[in-house]
């Protein structure tokens, strides 16, 4: 899940996972 963007949570993983909230 590289570059995942979900308008509910902001998260930046070392793998490049981005969750927006």
Image (cartoon, rainbow, N blue to C red):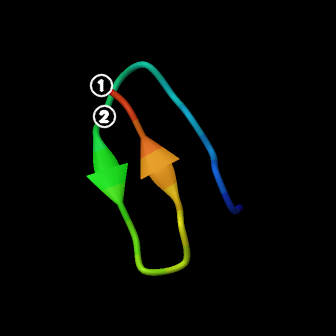
Q: In the figure, is residue 10 to the left or right of 19? A: left
Quadrant where the C terminus is found in the figure: top left
Q: Estimate the x, y position of residue 8 in percent, counting from the top left.
A: 35, 23
Query: What label does residue 21 carry, if any?
Result: 1
Percent coordinates x, y for residue 18 in the rendering: 47, 49
Q: Is residue 19 above or below residue 8?
A: below
Circle 2 packing at 10 Å, graded few (<14), some (14-19), many (20+), is few
Q: CA distance from mark 2 to mark 1?
A: 3 Å
Quarter location, residue 10: top left
Q: Is residue 16 above or below residue 15?
A: above
In the displayed image of the protein, which residue is found farthest to the top? 7
Taking the view exactly as shown, the residue that stands out farthest to the bottom is: 14
* Quadrant assignment, res 5: top right
The 10 Å Cα crowd at callout 1, few under 14, some 14 to 19, many 20 or more, is few
Q: Position of residue 7 (x, y in %)?
A: 43, 19
Question: Residue shown at 35%/59% (left/top)?
Answer: 12
What label sits on residue 13 in the rendered view? none
Q: Secondary structure at mark 2?
A: loop
Instruction: State if disc 1 and disc 2 touch (CB < 8 Å).
Output: yes
What residue is rendered at 31% in x and 51% in y? 11
Q: Secondary structure at mark 1?
A: loop
Report the residue marked by disc 2. Answer: 9
Question: Residue at (55%, 78%) from the top-left corner?
Answer: 15
Q: Earlier in the sequence, mark 2 or mark 1?
A: 2
Report how many numbered discs are placed on residues in the image: 2
Give residue 1's quadrant in the image: bottom right
């Amino acid at each position: 899940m590289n570059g995942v963007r979900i308008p509910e949570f902001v998260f930046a993983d070392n793998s490049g996972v981005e969750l927006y909230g």
